[in-house]
Every structure is written in C-alpha cells, then in structure tokens.
C-alpha cells in the first residue's frame, strides 16, 4: 500500500520524457485524452466519497438531534446545536461507561495475548528444531480454514460447563488462539537474517532473549499490523460475546447495542445512534491515526493467503 | 499452503514483494534442511574436537575407537540439545497449540458428533439419530427457502462487490487529487462493527425519516417498505453488506492494478487501443489471480455473515432474510435444537471447505501461469 502515494507525483514527469524521442505522436494522445477526462474523474471521485461517507456523517449528525429535529418530514439536515442529550439518555438506559471499559479491557488484553501467542508460536516454528514441527505448522494453518461458526455450539457448552458464562474469561479465552498472527509472524521471521540470530546465540543469548532483544525489534511493522487487526476484530466481535454474556455489567459495546435496541427499539433513533457512535468512533480514530499499518494488516491475507 | 498461495503476488504490487519472497524462502528453508539440520548442527559444534584427532594421522588403531567416542559424545550433546529445544518449543508454541486443540479442533470433531444426536441445548438427555438430522434438513420445507436466500444474498454481495470494487479501484487508480481521502473513506466501513453498521443503516432506511427515502424522493420514487415488504429487507441487507466491504475489494484491486506493468499499457496505447480495450484485453486478464482471490474471500465471508442480519432483520420478515448461517444461530440458540443445528453447521462447513478446495487447486494451477 505504501507504494501507492509516491507514484502520484513521479509519473507525469518521467512518462513523457522517455518515449517522446522515440514516438513523438503517441504520448500526446493519451495525455490529452486523460486531461479531457479529468472533470468526469473528479465528479465520480467526489460522488463516490460522498455516497460512501454520508452514512457515517449522518450517524454523527443524527446522534445530536432532538426528537423534534429527527422526526420532521422535510428532513432537517443539521442539528440545531451540539446537543449531547442522546448520549446521556443512552448512558441512562444501559451502563455505557461500564461497557466502554469492558470493551477497552477485553480488546487490550485479548489483542495483547493474541500477539504474544502468535509471536512465540511463530518463533518456535521458525527458529527451533523439534519433532513434528511440520505437523504443528499444518495444524495452525488449517485452522484458518475452519469457520468459527462450526465451533460455536461445542464451545458454548464447554464454556457453560466451566461456569464461564457471564465472565470475561468466557469472552476471551475461546478466541485467543492465533492462527492468522502466527502465520504472518512466521512469514516475516523467515525473511530475517539468520546471521544476526546466530551471532546472538554465540554470544550466549538464550531463546527468550533472542526473541525479545533481537527478533521483536526487527519485526515492528508486522507486530503493529497483527496487533491492529487483533484490536479491530476483538472490538467488533459480536456473536460470541452476545451468546456468552447476558448481564449488562459484563457486556461489550456491540452487545450493549443489542440491549439498547431491544429496550428502546426503533422509537428512539437519537439514543440508539448515539450509542452506535460510541461503538464505532474509537475504531474510526484508530483507523484514521494508524491507517497504513491497519490496512497493511487487513489486506495481508491477499498477499499471503 | 504457503507455497500454494504465493502466486497471488501479481495482485499485490510493491509492498508485498518482500513478504512474497519470504514465502518462497519459507517453502525452501523449513522443508529442505529440516531433516539434515539435526545432523549438521552437532557436527559444527564438534568441529574443534574432530581436527586434533585427525591431525596425528599416524595412529590408525585409535581411529575407530576415537570415532566411536566422538559419535557417543555427539549423540549425547545432540540429545541434550534436542531436549532443550523441545522444552523451548513446548514453552513457546505449546500455549497456542493447546488453545487451538481445545477451542478449534475439539469443537470441530464434537460438532460432527453432535450432528448425529437429537439433543437440545442444556438438556441432560440426548438420543442418537444417526444421519436423521441431515435427512430432516434436506426434507424440511424451510430448507429450500433458506438455500435460495443464501444463494441470492451470496451472489448479489460477491458479484456486486466485485463489479463496484473494480470500478472504484479504477477510479482510485487515476491520478486525481484527493484520491487518498476517497480511499480512506471507502475503506473505513470495513473496520467498523458489523452490528453497529446494521443499526446505523436501519436508520438510513427508515421509510419515513431515513436518508434513503429522501434521496429516492428527489428522483420521484416512493420509498419501498424496506423493513417489512419482501424482497426489500434482503435488498437492504445486500446494500449494507456491499457498503461495508466495498473498500476492501477496491483496495486489493487497486494493488493489483498498480502491479500491471506500465510498458504493457503504453504498448497498447501506441497500438491505438482505447482505454476500454486496454482494460478488457490487458488489465483484466492480468488481474485474474486477484479477481479469483477476491471471489473466494468474499464468498467465504459472505456465507458466514451474521452481524448485519442480526442487527437489521433478525432473519425476518417471515424468514425472508434467513441465510444458512443465520439459521444455525436460530436453530441452536433460539429454538435450542443444538443437534439439528450442528448438522446444518456441518453442511455449511462442507460448502466452505469446497470453496477453499477449489481455491487451492485453482491457485496451484496459477503457479504455472504466473
């Protein structure tokens, strides 16, 4: 993805210079055609941006509207004022602050553990020799093809029999195992120069030190990508926490949204949308700030499988 | 799997090149030296010991004995080393592996077993019925409707995402100012919670106060009853699914487009090919691996989609938006028929497996193409 931006400026100068000497007529034609198409291109670009972005803007605007502003028949586009009553009301109906804390906690702990599990597992798969290594790798990779849906009923009965319904570990533990992370880390580790690790070994660094002092510092982009993807999936995860939790004080934000939908229903859009903003905004902020790394992680599947 | 999937890289432009070469290396490194490794490593550590013994070459009788001692020493060293390695491997890979076995492989097998039982969630009694649940599913009056809904939803979302995604990618590939912003806006929905997105769009589709009915009003179309009147609830879900996943498809396509060699396009332009012709005869064929990857990925994701349906229609009205995936949830956790639901889950699993199998075969053939 990083290659996308620089080409923007580089192309127009370099393209005409080289072929101009060989075929003076040719480059001019596509050049003029391109210029004549630009207004159409910009129109389409603006249209696409507006259409794709409108729902998010509309959500934020609606979350600040009073019922009177929401339910008028020629639609009122902007709220009369920056009015956070809907947020307060949502926090009255469901423990919004508590849900936010739950979501943050579960996301941070879950993503952290997932990264640690993937990191250590990939280290063992790349830098250690042990029997049945290929079998272990096969087992890890094959889980990428097992849809989580098929595991839900047995996992639910297991979690229930452990007494883990309505607990944080009930939400967290069954989803911890890292296949995607292990895979990405392994791919990256295979590109690391072996000589550095061999030198570290000669200096008497054990595996634990080699992992944290040498491998981890050389893997920050992959680390960031795996961590961000884990954060996004943990935060957005819905079905599993929805099944495991029915007590409001243990819910995550998306599950709490269900609660609000069921209690306030579609009669109170402002409140429901205020809660929706609370669910979506943190991830949007993460996305805006760390866009490149997050996109690299989410689209890594296209490159690696 | 690694080697199989590498050839996707035509669809992966500049950045991935590093990782794809890594994949290629990976195919060689762990595969080839793994057997030789255990033998070669101990020798290198023993190297200093070997030399002095071979230096006094005038003593032939000591040679075999010496060698024996060395072999003993070596194997003991190797054994210790191997034991230590195994310990580290258990420590480092063990937790992940145990979690995978307990929470992925165990439930996978148990699900097959549950599918042969007549058993309700939380009930202490279960009656083995063999393939009865499967027979029931194949003969149930609702199955036809569920399969049709799943097919329509899947084809519409995959097809729509491919066409619109390619269009968006072509647009984003042009040297226009502000395309970075457009790319960001297009991708943003992909990172959001599916459930929240469903709620948000439910409001967009509100037949009286929604933005969609307003826009339709501008062109003089009366808003259909999105929530209640078939087939509109299904259309609504397809639209939302497309909105959420379009950015992903466009971004992968964009990476593919940027890896199409400029000389090929220049050559086509020299030959007087129109841009539409270049697209059809040069760009699209070169994008085949990307297209194929996206179709499979979208197919798998679409068949498993749940959050949006749960948020917007709960499978209704009258089951008109109940897909295979949603029916598994409904049968197990609403109706409590866990045994039957496990059978349906197995059916879905087999479908997904078939899609994956086709992908692996096809991509393997693509190796020769790329």
Image: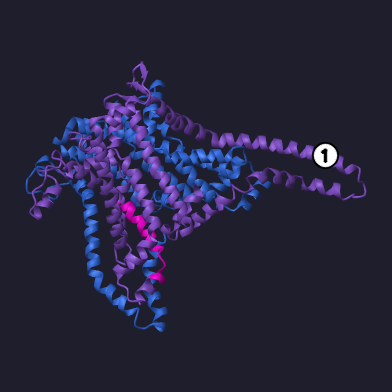
| Rendered colour, chain A | blue
Q: Is residue B174 visible?
A: yes
Q: Is residue B135 above or below residue B270?
A: above
Q: Which chain is purple?
A: B
How many other residues sit within 10 Å of disc 1, few (<14), some (14-19) or many (≥20)? Answer: few
Tally of marks = 1
Q: Chain of mark 1?
A: B
Compared across the picture, whether A125 is left or right of B16 comes to: right
Residue B179, position in %: x, y? 30, 62
Compared across the picture, whether A79 is left or right of B151 comes to: left
Q: Is residue B320 above or below residue A28?
A: above
Residue B18, position in %: x, y? 50, 57
Q: Disc 1 on helix, strand or loop?
A: helix
> Mark 1 sits on what residue?
B68
Which region is colored magenta? B246-264
Magenta stretch: dominant secondary structure: helix
């Amino acid at each position: 993805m990083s290659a996308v931006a620089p080409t923007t400026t580089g192309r127009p100068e370099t393209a005409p210079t080289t072929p101009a000497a060989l075929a003076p007529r040719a480059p001019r034609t596509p050049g003029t055609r391109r210029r004549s198409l630009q207004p159409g291109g910009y129109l389409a670009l603006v249209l696409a941006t507006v259409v794709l972005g409108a729902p998010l803007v509309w959500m934020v605007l609606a979350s600040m509207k009073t019922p009177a502003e929401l339910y008028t028949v020629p639609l009122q586009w902007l709220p009369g004022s920056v009015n956070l009553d809907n947020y307060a009301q949502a926090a009255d109906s469901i423990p919004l602050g508590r849900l936010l804390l739950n979501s943050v906690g579960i996301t941070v702990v879950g993503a952290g553990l997932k990264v640690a599990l993937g990191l250590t597992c990939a280290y063992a798969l790349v830098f250690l020799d042990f029997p049945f290594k290929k079998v272990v790798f096969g087992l890890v990779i094959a889980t990428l093809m097992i849809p989580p849906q098929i595991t839900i009923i047995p996992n639910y009965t297991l979690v229930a029999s452990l007494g883990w319904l309505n607990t944080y570990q009930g939400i967290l533990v069954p989803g911890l195992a890292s296949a995607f992370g292990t895979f990405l880390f392994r791919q990256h580790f295979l590109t690391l120069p072996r000589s550095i690790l061999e030198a570290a070994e000669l200096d008497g660094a054990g595996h634990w030190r080699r992992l944290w002092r040498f491998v981890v510092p050389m893997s920050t982009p992959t680390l960031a990508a795996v961590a961000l993807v884990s954060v996004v999936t943990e935060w957005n995860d819905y079905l599993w926490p929805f099944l495991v939790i029915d007590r409001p004080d243990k819910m995550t934000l998306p599950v709490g949204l269900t609660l609000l939908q069921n209690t306030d229903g579609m009669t109170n859009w402002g409140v429901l949308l205020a809660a929706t903003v609370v669910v979506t905004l943190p991830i949007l902020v993460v996305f805006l700030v760390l866009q490149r790394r997050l996109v690299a992680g989410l689209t890594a599947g296209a490159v690696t499988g | 799997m690694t080697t199989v999937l590498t050839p996707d890289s035509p669809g992966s432009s500049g950045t991935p090149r590093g990782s794809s070469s890594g994949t290629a290396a990976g195919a060689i490194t762990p595969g080839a030296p793994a057997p030789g490794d255990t033998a070669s490593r101990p020798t290198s550590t023993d190297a200093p010991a070997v030399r002095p013994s071979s230096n006094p070459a005038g003593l032939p009788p000591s040679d075999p004995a010496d060698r024996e001692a060395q072999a003993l020493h070596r194997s003991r060293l190797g054994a210790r080393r191997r034991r230590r390695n195994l310990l580290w491997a258990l420590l480092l890979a063990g937790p992940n592996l145990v979690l995978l076995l307990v929470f992925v492989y165990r439930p996978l097998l148990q699900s097959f077993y549950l599918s042969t039982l007549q058993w309700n969630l939380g009930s202490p009694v279960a009656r083995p019925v063999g393939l009865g649940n499967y027979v029931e599913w194949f003969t149930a009056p609702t199955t036809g409707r569920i399969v049709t809904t799943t097919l329509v939803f899947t084809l519409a979302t995959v097809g729509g995402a491919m066409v619109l995604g390619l269009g968006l990618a072509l647009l984003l590939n042009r040297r226009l100012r502000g395309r970075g912003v457009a790319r960001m806006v297009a991708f943003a929905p992909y990172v959001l919670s599916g459930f929240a997105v469903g709620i948000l769009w439910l409001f967009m589709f509100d037949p009286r106060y929604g933005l969609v009915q307003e826009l339709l009003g501008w062109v003089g179309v009366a808003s259909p009853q999105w929530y209640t009147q078939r087939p509109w609830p299904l259309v609504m879900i397809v639209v939302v699914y497309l909105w959420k996943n379009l950015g992903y498809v466009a971004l992968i396509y964009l990476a593919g487009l940027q890896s199409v060699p400029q000389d090929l396009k220049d050559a086509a332009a020299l030959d007087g090919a129109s841009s539409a012709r270049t697209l059809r005869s040069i760009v699209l064929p070169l994008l085949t691996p990307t297209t194929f990857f996206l179709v499979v990925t979208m197919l798998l994701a679409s068949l498993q989609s749940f959050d949006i349906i749960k948020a917007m229609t709960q499978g209704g009205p009258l089951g008109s938006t109940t897909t295979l995936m949603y029916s598994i949830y409904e049968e197990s956790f609403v109706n409590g028929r866990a045994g039957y639901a496990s059978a349906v889950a197995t059916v879905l699993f087999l479908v997904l497996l078939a899609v994956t199998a086709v992908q692996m075969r096809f991509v393997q053939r693509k190796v020769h193409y790329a």
